[in-house]
Amino acid sequence: MEAKSPRGTSDILPGPARVWQRIEKTVAQVMASFDYHEVRTPVFEHTELFTRGVGSTTDIVEKQMYTFDDRGGRSVTLRPEGTAPVVRAYIQHRLHGQGLPQKFWYIQPMFRYERPQAGRGRQFHQFGAESLGSLDPVCDVEMISIPVEVYRRLGITGFRVLLNSIGCPKCRPGYRSQLRDFLQSRIDSLCPTCQSRLERNPLRVLDCKSESCRRATDGAPASVDHLCDECDAHFAQVRRLLDTVHLPYTVDNRLVRGLDYYTKTVFEVVTSALGAQDALAAGGRYDGLAEELGGPPTPAVGFGAGMERAYLVLEKLGLTESDRDDVDVFLISLGADARLKAVEVAWSLRSAGVKTTFDYTDDPRGERSLRGQMKAAGKSGAKLALIIGEDELARGRVIIKAMASGEQRDVDLEAVVPQVLHELGGGGDGAR
Ligand code: HAM
């Protein structure tokens, strides 16, 4: 049977990988502009980190985690999201002693057992950031601005920022019971899932996609109308700051998020380009999480953004074609001795950072027709072809042919590296 990758995983082949590299580079540059610092955490963690951190009644913990016992009988889980691991690392390494806020970013694979579809995988990647240790609303606005700036630099347009505040342990219980009463009076119109979660998590009913739940929740009490003074002032300042940095947003009373750790600000960046999987990025404040995980009280805020979804939008917008990675030099040789010389020259060019390749052949001595090699050189997109025949070899020369113009010259073999660097205009990859 032909080997296949597991359902919900995907290979990133060389063409798309170049686009991924562009996204990754842009993320790193934007993070640097905002003075965030990269962290890398393990692919698996103790299962308890997520059951406690993300919340035992969330979809992630209830149905989506890749959890298994390792050979020592410890339950471990492949990271389904990036926030709890970063907070764990912050606590474990006592980073709160080093000046606050501590500002981190990451690009990492995540694992969730979901029903795969376009933009939704079982292994997917997020770029994200977490700012730990400050209640400053400027931190909230940084988290919304960073993905937006990444999309702007990549040329992604047509997204919207949705914003809400879901309060804190002081004001949310009062809101939750009002909402529950409201929903209780319409329980017959709710879908079975929402009927069952009404008691445990009535807020999630607000973002149910089923038509009947949407109708039933029209006119439901809004969390922003039930905030305590502190949460209300925080939300007002977040909005004022978003206006100050000219970042348009819509307050969406239905936005509640599917992870339990959120307090105050929640947000999503959504696009209509992706169909059902419309969230490009999402996040919010989680002022109680560090304490929940055994650390000191630590106000914090962050976001996570789907890399695959950013890629899909770039593809939709026709912005994935431009990432070419053509070779600089294609070496052509005639005869076994010239082939050896060509290999020697190629290694010198590669050492100098020039992207160099050949026409590979199954002939152990490297014999191949000139026509075949010229054809391969043309196909490769190389800027220069270097030709070494028996005659050139005898004279210690090499022919350099500019592929675009067809112009060619004959240079001393000893001088070939500087000459190639010169013709490529300032050097190969390493020198440019
Ligand atoms: P999340 O909403 O679960 O939040 O995921 C954030 C983003 O990851 C989504 O908006 C989407 O772009 C992408 N994503 C999620 N699941 C998948 C999937 N199965 N396939 C492809 N892409 C997916 C979090 O994970 C939080 N940790 C975000 C956060 C950071 N909040 C505070 N700090």
Image (spheres, helix red, strand yellow):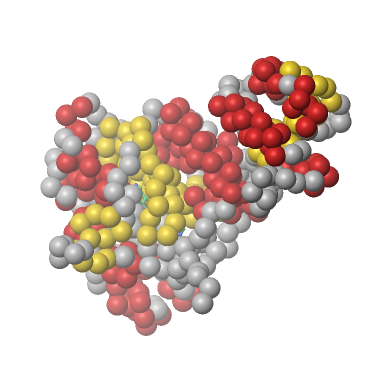
Residue shown at the point (58%, 63%) measured from the top left: 275
Query: Which residue is situated farthest in the right direction here?
Result: 406
Quarter where residue 202 is shown: bottom left
Seen in the image, is 213 located left or right of residue 165?
right
- Please name whichever residue, 351 or 152, is drawn nearer the observer in this view of the structure: 351
Residue shown at the point (41%, 57%) measured from the top left: 255
Rendered view: 299 above or below 257: above
The percent coordinates of residue 98 (x first, y second) are 20, 27
Seen in the image, is 201 located left or right of residue 15?
left
Seen in the image, is 368 located left or right of residue 247?
right
The percent coordinates of residue 36 (x first, y second) are 37, 31
Rendered view: 29 above or below 174: above
Residue 289 visible in the displayed image: yes
For the C terminus, the quadrant is top right
The percent coordinates of residue 416 (x first, y second) are 69, 21
Seen in the image, is 195 located left or right of residue 378?
left
Total count of labels: 0
- Please name whichever residue, 420 or 111, is drawn nearer the observer in this view of the structure: 420
- Please name whichever residue, 86 or 336, is drawn nearer the observer in this view of the structure: 336
Residue 327 visible in the displayed image: no
- Please name whichever residue, 36 or 239, is drawn nearer the observer in this view of the structure: 36
Rendered view: 376 above or below 141: below
The percent coordinates of residue 148 (x first, y second) are 51, 40
Residue shown at the point (39%, 48%) measured from the top left: 108
Residue shown at the point (34%, 58%) measured from the top left: 80
- Write down which quadrant ligand 1 falls in: bottom left
